[in-house]
Amino acid sequence: MVVVLVAGAAVGDYYYLGSLVHHQDVRGLQVNPSSEPSLNILMIGSTSRCALKTQNAAYGLCSQGVTGVNSDIDMILHLDPATGAVSLLSIPRDLFVPNARAEGANKIDAALYEGPSQLVDAIEEDFGIPINHYVELNFDTFASVVNALGGVRMYFPVPIFDAYSGLNIERKGCYLLNGYRALQVVRARHLQIQPNPSNHDPRSWPQEALSDLARIRRTHEFLRVMASQVAQRGLSNPFTDQRIASAVLPDLTVDNGFSEGLMVHLARVFSHVSIANVPQLTYPVTLVETGSYLYQGYYYGDVEFPVEPTGQLAIDQLFGVGATTNSFTGQPLPAANSFKVAVEDGAGVPSELGATVVGLRQRGFSVSSASTVTPVGRVDETVVWYGGPPPPAHGNWTSPALAAAQRVERTLEGPVIMGYNPKMVVPGSLVTVVAGTGLTFVPIASTTTTTVPHTTTTNVTTTTSPNVTTSTIFDPSGIKSNPLFTPPSPTSTALAPYDPRACNAAGTGPG
């Protein structure tokens, strides 16, 4: 977020600075025709070592075979110039989605291997989130902006260590992090924490769980700290702005439509925003605990499944829309009885087929057929498949099938996601639900409050109705009852006691 706004801050010579930015043709981007449109900017942290100008052994060398291209960070920045609202949604890198690759399912971070257009398509097709602009940063960009600021100060409550990122904090206290050390902090997802002051062997320290989600939490905190330091110096300081922009822009990749003029406009409109007040959400997931996940004969390592209904609620909060609104277009969703829905049992549980048909019909949907297909894995996420024309290369996507799929998805609970593939849609239906493991339904009209326990977490209180909120850690019964699923992650979480955070003004403790 800081980079996007700072990129246009040096107004005096922004045409020159704009010439430093690397522009790239990105297909599938949506164009909002209104005069003051809200914008969704897809911000990517690329792991490509081969794209770095200077190779660094600490990151892994391209010449030694570290040639993977993944998006370790996938964030959607929502900007509404009309209201001045800003919000941020992170998508966990290990989230398994149907359209990650052109040929089919994979982790969301694997989409970037086929280019930014594929990643844009995956997010639009599987989450119903329109993307207007694309910004890609790499290791160099991140380190450059930190160094241009003169470093970032953070407080570490306890010693921590990460052998993979190189992070090694030997004693608690405030540290001035240069770009290289700051990168160690936000890359750390194999963090080990000192259990007691007498143990000085970091390799014997216990490792935190939920590594992917924990890293997102720390990245959000780093953004808050860094943005606060930028605000203290002021984006209107031409010397600071010039230094930051000159350091960052040569390593920045944006889509062809993200002009210098638009960058300047966004910097002016949102310069007053306090990042401390910006909602920073994380798409809720459940970890699939089967070892390396086996899907259609291939192993994918650790994966996560999306969790509904809180996943869609996080998207709704991002856009400020209600449950009956199409998050892609802002228009009302179609009536349940206005299209045909086919149902397939993809979990190998015959009783689930009948339960899914009954559940949909009880909610007003017209079920055209019911059948059984071969399960694709030991556990499967439910996919709400839809077809129709794909997103155009350039121009807005209007898809009645996507709207219908959203209408169906909003009635489902558990590991559920949408997927675009006309071949997966049963003829005679607009939408086909392939029911996976742990599928249940949002109650029709219940407003009671109950306690939802999970065997590995403290009980939490939640409403068993469509009014579940993003502040609720909602645990659908199909996830709660299956030992292969972990409890759903929250969309927003407090820092762990060992997480780095802001320093106080004196630099002697936490801020």
Image (cartoon, rainbow, N blue to C red):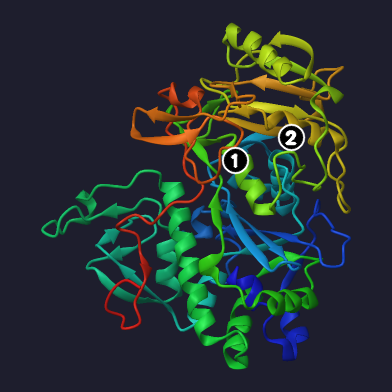
* 394 on left or right of 435: right
Circles 2, 1 touching at the beta carbon (< 8 Å): no
Circle 2 residue: 406
Q: Position of residue 468 (x, y in %)?
A: 56, 38
Specify the amino acid type for callout 2: Gln
Q: Secondary structure at mark 2?
A: helix
Q: Is residue 420 in view?
A: no
* 257 on left or right of 508: right
Q: Is residue 388 in view?
A: yes
Camera-side residue: 423 or 502?
502
| Quadrant in the picture for residue 351 | top right
Q: Position of residue 304 (x, y in %)?
A: 51, 36
Q: Classify 363 as above or below 250.
A: above
Residue at the spot 81% in from the left edge and 63% down from the top edge: 37
- Please rate how many residues cluster around mark 2, counting C-alpha atoms within 10 Å: few if below 14, some from 14 to 19, many from 20: many
Q: Position of residue 386 (x, y in %)?
A: 78, 29
Circle 1 residue: 311
